[in-house]
Every structure is written in C-alpha cells, then in structure tokens.
Image (cartoon, rainbow, N blue to C red):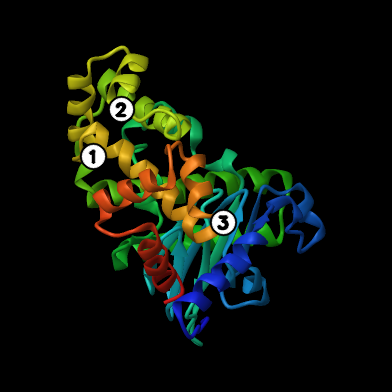
Amino acid sequence: MIRVGNLSAICTYIKKYSMHLKRLEIKKNIQKTDDKNLSFRVFDLGTASLQDYLKPHKKDHFCIILVESGTSKVHIEDKIYLLNSGKIAVIFPDQIHFLSNLSTDLTGKIILFEEVLFCSDILKNELSAYNVNLSAHLNCTALSSLEFEQVLPIIKNIQDIYNAPSLVKKEQARFYIKIFLLGLIESIHGQHPVLHHDAQGPNQQTYIDFKKLLNHHYKSERTVQYYASKLAISTKKLNALNKNYSGETAINAIHNRILIEIKRQLLFTDLSHKEIAFDLGFSSPSALNKFVKAKLKETPTDLQNGLAQIYTA
C-alpha cells in the first residue's frame, strides 16, 4: 500500500505514474515458449507476476482476477472494490487500474485473454440484451458459494491447458473461457434490475447505439437533439429509452460521460485544468469549473484532491 503524507504528495504520486503509465500487452507477456502462440495466460495470485499490477496501468487485453482466499483491493478508474473469497473482477482493455492491500494469505487466479475471446459475436447477436453497461457490472461480481464452486473446475481446466497446450486443447480453452464469462454475465443479469427489461427488438439496440455514439462524440456533441437525430428518433423517445434502460435522462447520460473523462484526466494526466477544459470542449476553464460545481457541488481542484485520497486509500 502507498502511504502519502498530504494531498499535494498524493497528487504528485499519481501524476508520477500517470506520466509513465504502462500499457501492458499480452503478446509481450511471455513466460514460456508456448505463450507466443496463445491468446490467453493463467497465473496464480501472489506470485512475482503481480509486480506490474501494483502501480496504475492499462492493458490491451482483458484481465480476470478471481480470489479464493484472503483479500485485496482493486482500483479501477475512480472506483475501489474489495476482493475476497468468491469475488471476481473483470477488467476491460484500457481501463486504468491497480491492486493494493494484498493480504498475506491471498490466493486465487489471474486470467488474461485477448478481446476476440470475449464472446463478442454472441453478445452482439443472441445476447445483445445483456450488453448494456456490461463493464460496470463485471468490474466486481460476488458469486454465491455454489456458483463459485462450479467456477473453480472451469478455471482449473483453463490453467491445465495453459500449462500444457496443444492445438486441440487451445480450442478447448477458448470454450472454457467463454463458458466462464457467460456464467458471470448470467449471474449479474440476476443482480442488476437494469438488465431485466425485455430488450428484444429495435428499442434496446437503439439504446446501445446511443451509448456507442456518446462514447465517440461526447467531447464535441452535448445535446440530446444531436444524438436523437443521428438515431432517427425524437428526443422524447431517446429520453424514454434512457429512463427505461439506465434510469437516467439522456442529458444526464451525456453529462455523466463527460464527468467520467474529467475524473480520468484529473487523476491520470498532467494536463492543467485549462488544458482539460479545452480538450473536453469547454469554452474556458471557468466553464469547466461551473459544470463540475453544478454536477458535483465542488470545484475541479476539490474533485482532484478527493479522488487522489480515494485512489490511494
């Protein structure tokens, strides 16, 4: 755990690592000869392979952290989750994260895999209803004792194949990883009411299309009218879809996406508030200040200091 004496030092610590933020690549994670031809890796928690995970970083691949015993904290963006027995964290590519407060009795597994294995075709087609805010729900999942016991043999099969792969076994591993992920998705489907809506048909796809558009254009487009016109629906319809699937209005969805990026830049870049304001499409630093105060009742400086405290807790 990192202990820093004051807010200024905390911010300096975060800036230090953000300026040299590593982006770990799975193809460069070579522990044995076979790894050059594998799209996944499996490691035990608590080994030397965790050293790079103790500082803020990104990955170009998915990472699953499964805890069998002991505890650890996983910091993902501006959130902190406590991992203990029965909990699983799925970290998506390019999410900034690191581990802290690892207990001495920590045991479990880490599975790394390329994006192509993440059931992408299935989620886009047969299971599109599940693909709503999926990363937020999968960042930390608590399984029941029965569910967790059912998962462990699957993980063992994946690790056994990783340790002694063959052409056929590599294909088996891909299926095991998909079975594991689909089980997690089914589990969170029961835990998050937002996923219970009957999403068959165009309405749910329109909502997903809105989220995709928002992720691409939030820096330059801030009006509900823009997104509604791109989707060829009315602003009233877009608001209704958002209320149905996320419980918030379309304008709040737009504002919250901007807030997420403000938090990321305050934490993980060395940009000034002026530079952040212009990068995110604000007319001036005072406009950024006004936006943050209106949404969060605090200044960007207050927000930055608060995030620094939380992130190094």
* Horizontal and vertical percent position of residue 124: 43, 29
The CA distance from mark 2 to mark 3 is: 31 Å
Residue extending farthest right? 33
Q: Quadrant of the C terminus?
A: bottom left
User: CB atoms at circles 3 and 1 under 8 Å apart?
Assistant: no
Tell me if 6 is positioned left or right of 159 in this view: left
Q: Amino acid at mark 3?
A: Thr
Q: Earlier in the sequence, mark 3 or mark 1?
A: 1
- Which residue position holds label 2? 207
Tell me, yes or no, if residue 9 can be seen here. Answer: yes
Q: Nearer the viewer, mark 2 or mark 3?
A: 3
- Which residue position holds label 1? 246
Does residue 95 sit above or below 221 in this rendering? below
Task: Specify the quadrant of the image occupied by residue 56.
Answer: bottom right
**Badge 1 element:** helix
**Badge 3 element:** loop
> Mark 2: few, some, or many residues within 10 Å (few <14, many ≥20)?
many
Q: Earlier in the sequence, mark 2 or mark 1?
A: 2
Which residue shows up at 20% across the image and 39% down it?
248
Which residue shows up at 44% across the image and 69% down it?
308
Q: Amino acid at mark 1?
A: Ser
Does residue 86 sit above or below 259 in this rendering? below
User: Which residue is more in the foreground, 236 or 44?
Assistant: 236
> Mark 3: few, some, or many residues within 10 Å (few <14, many ≥20)?
some
Task: Specify the quadrant of the image occupied by residue 15.
Answer: bottom right
* Horizontal and vertical percent position of residue 279: 52, 41
Q: Amino acid at mark 2?
A: Tyr
User: CB atoms at circles 2 and 1 under 8 Å apart?
Assistant: yes
The label on residue 269 is 3
Does residue 312 sit above or below 198 in this rendering? below
Which residue shows up at 18% across the image and 33% down it?
244
Q: Nearer the viewer, mark 3 or mark 1?
A: 3
